[in-house]
Amino acid sequence: MGVNYRAGFVAVMAGLLSVCGLYAQQTAVTAPVTITLDEAIRRAEANEPAFAASVADSKVAALDRSIARAALLPNAVYHNQYLYTQGGTGTTTPRFIANNAVHEYTSQGVVNETVGLAGVAEIKRADAAAAFAEAQLEVARRGLVATVVGLYYGLLSADQKLQVATRAAGEADAFVDLTQKREAAREAAHADVIKAQLEQQQRRRDLEDAKVAAERARLELGVLLFPDPRTQYVLQEAPIRDGLPTRAEVEAAASANNPDIKSAFAALRQSDAEVLAARAAYLPDLGVSAMYGIDAPQFAVRGPDGLHNLGYSAMVTVDIPVWDWLSTQHKVRQSEIRRDAARVALTAAQRRLIAELDEYYSEAVAAHNQLASLDQSVQTAADSLRLTKMRYTGGEATVLEVVDAQNALTLAENAREDGRVRYEMALANLQTLTGTL
């Protein structure tokens, strides 16, 4: 009996330990991930497909630059060939005169080089295309950063609004209880209870809407951060960023670091290179080829007569364009039309930069200046609600005054969260424009 009891006790304890271990493992697995703003940006850059496409385009353009430069350098091949030609009757003379012997073996190293303006123009075009792709990558990166910042602070705001809705619902429940007690004590009419219950029902509906909004904001950000957007995570509370730069600093940074201007300049340089490449078709190309090896009736270093089969030859070719039915002229015209369009795009980007700089800076200044006022409004609304409830409890205020004070506090708290998101988005747009984010 004792042995069986001890064995059963050991088995039970082992089962309990197993269950505890499994619970701990599940808890560790389902523990929410803490995400900072920098971590959110890093994860978004790894998961967002449009940004990944921009990264791929930039890398491909860099390889195109290397390919264009390699085209100006000599290339070498090892050429091997066997030719059979019909011979004359009873002779070793080939009947097919295009070849040198009935049996001809070619095994040569060949070096080719072509020199022309088209190759130089192609390098210029590839360099400009690489610069354009790099600028577009920076545009995509800054756009993605601005999106992540908006979603990040939007989720923080949605969570705060959920807390506001929860507080407001609790406040409404407490006020219903207060009106019912005052009605029972014959200190208030039943109409006060009805008004408080209507407010309570509205606050509960607002709470449900706030829950849905917070969940929607969490999923939208989760799409950029995780393979499964339903992954549980929490955002690290980020303080309001202060220290708005001066207007002169913003203008200097925007003129030096704006990616849209860099992209427009690169596009214009690329168009200039395309014009040069099109005009290069008017000029001749110089081709040089050098060959060393075997070109003989025997595949051997020495022939039957003891002579060396190894030898070399060289060839220089100059092709002068004469007539191509005006296709070169039309290609030049096409490239010039595209260059004119690129110039218009550059001037438009410069005008847009000036307008956006004024707009974003004014928005950031206004949003920054309103932060303190919004905090003060919340404090004032909270004091007003507290005093109004005290007056209502003492019979000196009506139920409508209490409901108005409750609504004013809720509106002030939500406005404060909207103001914080507005400031963060304005600052993100300004930093994206100036390249400081």
Image (tube, helix red, strand yellow):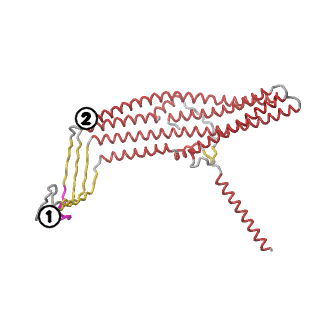
Quick one: 280 or 236, which is closer to the camera? 280
Quick one: 326 or 379, which is closer to the camera? 326
Helix, strand or loop: magenta stretch: loop
- Counting residues from the start of the chain, the first of labels 2 and 1 encountered is 1
Quadrant housing the N terminus: bottom right
What is the secondary structure assignment of the residue under circle 1?
Answer: loop
Nearer mark to the viewer, of 2 and 1? 2
Q: Could you tell me residue 301's position as x and y percent?
A: 19, 64
Rendered image: mark on residue 373:
none
In the rendered view, does 353 fall on the left or right side of 394?
left
In the rendered view, would you say 146 is above or below 77? above
Range of residues picked out in magenta: 296-312
- Residue carrying label 2: 326
Q: Could you tell me residue 389's position as x and y percent?
A: 80, 30
What amino acid type is highlighted by mark number 2? Answer: Leu
The residues tagged by marks 2 and 1 sit, at their Cα atoms, a distance apart of 53 Å
Identify the residue shown where x is 49% and y is 40%: 140
The residue furthest left is 90
- Residue carrying label 1: 307
Q: Quadrant of residue 291?
A: bottom left
